[in-house]
Image (spheres, helix red, strand yellow):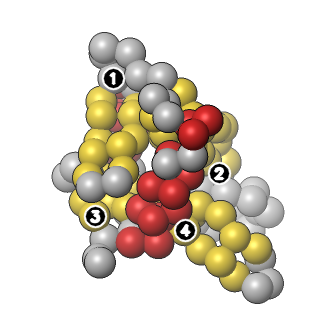
Amino acid sequence: MESATLSASVTVTEAAAKEIAAFMGQQENQGKSVRLFVDGFACSGPHWALALDEPNQEETVYSAPGVVLIADKETQDMISEGGGLTINYVNDPNFGEGFSILANNARSCGSGCSCGG
């Protein structure tokens, strides 16, 4: 399986889609959705995050087989401004495992700061 494009602006890799589907398949997560949102800013741009939540009528829904993500209007605008996002799931022996969410037009701050973004 290759990366799944949920929309023109959000791509989920095979590894991420598998993890999301497994997590959402758990009984306690039934009926919920995965919210994509901005959890603060760094000098390199927004810090993207995922959380369980319930959608409202005004939200954008991204879906592909086994994956449904929701985002509010403000988040959707930021996704577009960043040239879209790629969501991956990594398992690195040196850094641990988890989701990696990167803007397709991500920039480094270039200022020499240690912004952690």
Callout 2 amino acid: Cys
Callout 4 amino acid: Tyr
Disc 3: which residue:
4
**Residue positioned most to the front:** 27
Disc 4: which residue:
89
Callout 3 amino acid: Ala
| Residue 41 in view in this figure | yes
Q: What element carries label 4?
A: strand
Instruction: Verify CB contact (< 8 Å) between mark 2 and mark 3.
Output: no
- The N terminus, quarter of image: bottom left
Using a 10 Å C-alpha cutoff, classify the residue at mark 4 as few (fewer than 14 neighbours), some (14 to 19) or many (20 or more): some
Q: Earlier in the sequence, mark 2 or mark 3?
A: 3
Along the horizontal axis of the image, is 115 left or right of 17? right
Q: Earlier in the sequence, mark 4 or mark 1?
A: 1
Using a 10 Å C-alpha cutoff, classify the residue at mark 2 as few (fewer than 14 neighbours), some (14 to 19) or many (20 or more): some
Q: What element carries label 1?
A: loop
Using a 10 Å C-alpha cutoff, classify the residue at mark 3 as few (fewer than 14 neighbours), some (14 to 19) or many (20 or more): many
Quadrant for residue 18, please give it.
Answer: bottom left
Disc 1: which residue:
59
